[in-house]
């Protein structure tokens, strides 16, 4: 279980990730803010507590791997990586510009700390499966974590991978679905209802849990339980809200991709700074 | 070491490679038997990764394995790889330049004999020719397929090896290496024209060159075994010795050998070109020899095209 201080620390990390993400997106002028925001707490738990990674040696062989299957949410991953020291924070201001190391979608060719290029939806989970299988050849020395979007679960390949991971008993694979209920054309329910995702993965042979995706303690507990599994892969359904932690995004009917002005950035950062101050007072 | 046909040749080479390189794994899309790789799986059960009938997932699983240091060979029907999993090959293997090897069987009209259009693939080379980082090997028989598989791991990046039905006629003697320069001259009868062939109709092209020789047309015949070669200088040198070239391939005339040679000729040494292959048509089910004849690959018909080519510009 996380201590109260650790929870505070990870909430602070989440707020810092949000600030850095909004700053990057406003520099670019627009971006996929909704999905970038909804997975922030999971990134904070992974990069702030769980994952064995070394910013000074991003290619270390025994590092844990991360696959951002919903590759369009790259900006908050970049913020987490920059805050962990994989590259200077200043790089975030080059998001999606010419010659950047931070393209809109995650790219292993360009970004230190990014293990897999993603962006075309429905495919990351198969690569994560390959990565988890690869761990076996190295004595199961690492875990592979993968975040999928809910909308991309429309893709048939996700379910090819769901079968494969169970068949191969990939217990060093821990996947998440960021179930924020929105995709480009509308709500997930309206576009292509996913039904009971937890039950679906269970029936595919996974150990499946459902947690509040904005509660770091629940995410952490979910990961700990998943790490305790043997002989089956784990799925953690993150109940989230698209745009969470950015009032501007939350106020839009659909916040998948939005313009972000400097004024909006200022308002959001001021609000996040106030939250950070409150949290710090709580720590003291 | 013994094998018959391109599929068995693949399997034997794979097994030999896995014996000396622990990074080699085989990714199957319910294609272990089709790839004649059962003996490999028996010898290396932990290196045999079965994905079931899911080519898209298979290619991305291979990408994941390669990103973690393994050298996966993905083997299944050529079109199920290059068409169904085309985006996976392009974006998740070729773009990050991952070390994945692909072996596509049933390639060509003859390669997919008796299976018909759904299992006969004459577009694979055209598709892959437009994707950067992919090296394309087109071995002409079993012996060259064996060598191509061995040669593929010398390249740190994606390689596609075109294989057939397993009933290809043997052309090359044992021990012939896979030509690094991307072609090998098999007949040098003279300078009347150059004939470039690729793939499993090579026996028919050789027969045609021999017939033409008797008729007084002195051709040089090259087997082109690497398409879109990044270092085509030697092939360009060869082209420069001629003013006519015929290309013969068991593939659509667009995108494969014909297109490759046309591009080199246009850019370096303009000359008269005839392309033989599938022209604006699909194939059909039938016996290999019967099909090859019906679609224009008889030695006599190849000779006819040469005569036509010899008339051009005169």
Image: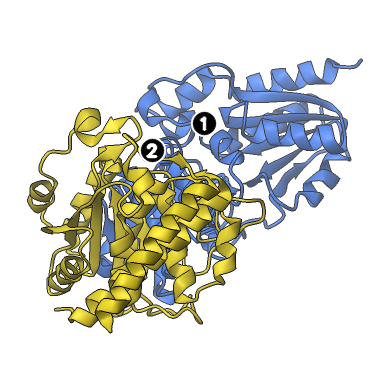
Chain colours: A yellow, B blue
All told, the count of numbered labels is 2
Mark 1 neighbour density, 10 Å: few (under 14) some (14–19) many (20 or more): many
| Image coords of residue B271 (percent x, y) | 86, 28
Q: In this view, does A51 lie to the left or right of B267?
A: left
User: Foreground residue, B108 or B263?
Assistant: B263
- Find numbered disc 1 in the image and state the secondary structure of the residue it sits on: loop
Residue B263 pos. (x, y %): 76, 34
Q: Earlier in the sequence, mark 2 or mark 1?
A: 2
* Residue appearing at x 43%, y 52% in the figure: A118
Query: Would residue B197 be seen by someone viewing this image from the given angle?
Result: yes
Residue B79 horizontal/vertical position (percent): 42, 35
Please report, as a chain letter, where disc 2 is located: B
Q: Which mark is residue B80?
A: 2
* Residue A208: numbered disc: none
- Around disc 2, counting alpha carbons within 10 Å, would you say few (fewer than 14), some (14 to 19), or many (20 or more)? many
The answer, for residue A46, to whether it is visible in the render is: no
Marks 2 and 1 share the same chain? yes
Q: Residue at x 25, y 34 (%)?
A: A187
Label ID, residue B123: 1
Q: Which residue is drawn at 58% across and 34% down?
A: B126
Tell me whether the residue at label 2 lies in contact with that at label 1, contact meaning CB atoms closer than 8 angstroms.
no
Report x, y in % for residue B310: 83, 20
- Quarter of the figure that contains the C terminus of chain A: bottom left
Q: Which of A38 and B14 is in front in this view?
A: A38
């Amino acid at each position: 279980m996380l201590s109260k201080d650790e929870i505070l620390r990870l909430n602070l990390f989440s707020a810092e990730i949000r600030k850095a993400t909004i700053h990057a997106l406003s520099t670019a002028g627009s971006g996929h803010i909704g999905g970038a925001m909804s997975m922030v707490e999971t990134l904070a738990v992974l990069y702030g507590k769980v994952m064995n990674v070394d910013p000074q040696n991003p290619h270390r062989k025994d590092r844990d791997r991360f696959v951002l299957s919903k590759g369009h949410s790259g900006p908050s991953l970049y913020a987490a990586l920059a805050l962990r020291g994989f590259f200077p924070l200043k790089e975030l201001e080059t998001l999606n510009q010419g010659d950047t190391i931070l393209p809109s979608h995650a790219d292993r060719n360009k970004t230190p700390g990014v293990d897999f290029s993603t962006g075309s939806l429905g495919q990351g989970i198969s690569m994560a499966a390959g990565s988890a299988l690869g761990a076996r050849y190295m004595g199961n020395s690492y875990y592979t974590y993968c975040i999928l979007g809910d909308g991309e679960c429309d893709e048939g390949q996700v379910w090819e991978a769901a079968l494969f991971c169970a068949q191969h008993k990939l217990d060093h694979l821990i996947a998440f679905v960021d179930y924020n209920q929105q995709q480009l054309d509308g709500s997930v329910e309206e576009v292509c209802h996913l039904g009971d995702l937890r039950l679906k993965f269970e029936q595919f042979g996974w150990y499946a849990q459902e947690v509040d995706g904005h509660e770091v303690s629940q995410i952490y507990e979910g990961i700990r339980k998943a790490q305790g599994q043997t002989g089956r892969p784990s799925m953690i359904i993150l109940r989230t809200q698209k745009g969470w932690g950015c009032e501007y995004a939350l106020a839009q009917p659909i916040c998948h991709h939005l313009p972000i002005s400097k004024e909006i950035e200022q308002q959001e950062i001021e609000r996040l700074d106030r939250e950070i101050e409150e949290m710090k007072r709580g720590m003291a | 070491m013994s094998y018959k046909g391109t599929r068995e040749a693949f399997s034997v080479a794979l097994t030999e490679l896995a014996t000396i390189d622990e990074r080699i794994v085989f990714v199957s899309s319910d294609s272990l038997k089709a790839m004649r790789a059962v003996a490999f799986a028996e010898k290396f059960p932990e290196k045999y990764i079965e994905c079931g009938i899911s080519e898209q997932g298979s290619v991305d699983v291979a990408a994941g394995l390669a990103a973690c240091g393994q050298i996966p060979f993905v083997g299944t029907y050529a079109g199920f790889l290059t068409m169904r999993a085309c985006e996976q090959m392009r974006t998740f293997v070729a773009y990050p330049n991952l070390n994945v090897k692909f072996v596509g069987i049933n390639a060509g009209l003859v390669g997919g004999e008796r299976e018909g259009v759904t299992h006969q693939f004459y577009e694979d080379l055209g598709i892959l020719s437009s994707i950067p980082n992919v090296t394309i090997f087109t071995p002409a028989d079993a012996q060259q397929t064996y060598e191509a598989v061995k040669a593929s791991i010398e390249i740190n990046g994606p390689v596609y090896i075109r294989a057939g039905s397993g009933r290809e006629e043997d052309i090359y003697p044992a021990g012939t290496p896979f030509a690094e320069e991307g072609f090998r001259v098999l007949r040098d009868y003279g300078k009347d024209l150059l004939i470039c062939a690729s793939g499993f109709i090579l026996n028919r092209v050789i027969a045609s060159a021999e017939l033409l020789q008797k008729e007084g047309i002195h051709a040089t015949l090259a087997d082109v075994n690497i398409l879109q070669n990044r270092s085509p200088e030697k092939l360009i040198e060869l082209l420069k010795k001629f003013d006519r070239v015929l290309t013969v391939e068991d593939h659509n005339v667009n995108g494969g050998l014909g297109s490759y040679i046309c591009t080199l000729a246009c850019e370096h040494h303009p000359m008269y070109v005839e392309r033989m292959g599938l022209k604006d048509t699909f194939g059909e089910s039938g016996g290999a020899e019967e099909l090859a004849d019906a679609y224009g690959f008889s030695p006599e018909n190849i000779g006819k095209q040469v005569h036509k080519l010899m008339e051009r510009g005169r």
